[in-house]
Image: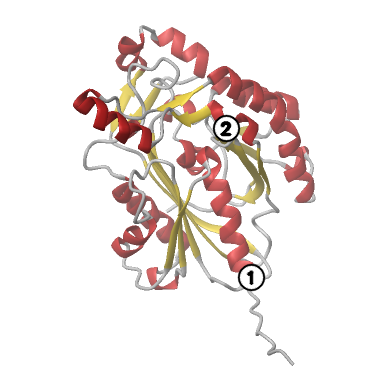
Amino acid sequence: MSARLAQTTGAEHTAILGLGVYRPERVVTNDEVAGPINSSDEWIRTRSGIRTRRFAGPDETIQTMSVAAARGALESAGVAVDQVDCVIVATSTHLLLTPAAAPPIATDLGMNGAAAFDISAGCAGFCHALAIASDLVRAGTAKNVLVIGVEKLTDTINPADRSTAFLFADGAGAVVVGPAEQQGIGPTVWGSDGTQSHAIRQDKNWLEFFAEIDEKGLAAVRPYLTMEGTAVFRWAAHSLEKVCRDAIDRAGLDTDDLDAMIPHQANGRIIEIMARVLKLPESCALADDIAETGNTSAASIPLAMEALLRTGRSKPGDTALLIAFGAGLSYAAQVVTLPRLA
């Protein structure tokens, strides 16, 4: 007779308990990025909705930005460092294959022994990490989970690339996920479409780069992030309505129940199209942090969430739809109850 394994059970309900962000100090205007791509402020605003973005300096790293955002999240949640059992970092711009970013971030926060790992799901990474964190708490694997979305995209883009240079920026956002009296994180609808994986990619892999170094020496051109903007735009505009509606349905709600919609801040035009096809009520706040922050990939959802709460357009306790999409092409959506800020 085989041995019977014990089974753990966790919290019946989970929620986002607190939120913190880090925005780099340097504000970069459209005029500053327009020169190398032979563009203009008007062209960039019309194409993307972006007016400014934040670029991190040499001392503002994946690690330091994450730690700053995490401290804000822990403070607003009222959760002590020693109450966190797991740290999940969603990022595509930690430029070390190993170790992951999460363990040293956890150590910098004073966590000893907490599980810590990274996930890579492009711009959808934060929503993926949020789903994993909620499931860990409900399963009893962890009581509280720190989720961080962080990017330093300026390390990965070519400033002369007209398809990316004006879009991407830097920043970090973090939340604490833990037990709650009522469900505050709805079921996640997620997936991927690998037939579109070419649309957002690194333009050469590292082995190709190393081979070029061996052949050309210092003349080798480093890998950069590249994007086929039209392909991404068409895919997002035509494929994500069903994902949003499924997430709302699985939460047991309809669009009239939404107080806010917080989409990944990819492009102002995509955000407007998504809001229009969903026929959101006039009372539903639509996150448009892209205008001031640019596209920060896995950091964009928590940064946009913070902007809505900070400006008073949304308040703690509001019901919000999160929808993120990006490289893969990957996507994830869930309905959440908005947390408090520090």
Task: Give the left or right position of residue 110, taking residue 121 as reference.
Answer: left
Whether residue 139 is situated above or below residue 294 in the rendered picture: below
Look at the image and name its color scheme.
Answer: secondary structure
Residue type, label 2: Ser
Of residues 41 and 331, the one nearer the viewer is: 331
Disc 1 and disc 2: Cα gap in Å?
A: 32 Å
**Residue 24 horizontal/vertical position (percent):** 31, 37
- Binning the other alpha carbons within 10 Å of mark 1 as few (below 14), some (14 to 19) or many (20 upward) gives some
Outermost residue, left direction?
A: 218
Q: Secondary structure at mark 2?
A: helix
Q: Residue at x 20, y 27 (%)?
A: 218
- Label 1: which residue? 139
* Image coordinates for residue 8, horizontal then vertical, percent: 64, 79
Mark 2 surroundings: few (<14), some (14-19) or many (≥20) residues within 10 A: some
Question: Considering only vertical position in the picture, is 193 above or below 50?
Answer: below
> Residue at the spot x=59%, y=67% of the render?
137
Q: Choose between 178 and 284: the one closer to the eye.
A: 178
**1 or 2: mark nearer the eye:** 2
Name the residue: 45% across, 68% down.
Answer: 84
Circle on res. 80: none
Disc 1, SS: helix
Residue where numbered disc 2 is placed: 197
> Looking at the image, is 182 positioned above or below residue 322?
below
Q: Residue at x 66, y 22 (%)?
A: 273
Give the mark nearest the N terminus, 1 or 2: 1
Vertical arrangement, residue 144 with respect to residue 41, above or below: below
* Amino acid at dot 1: Ala
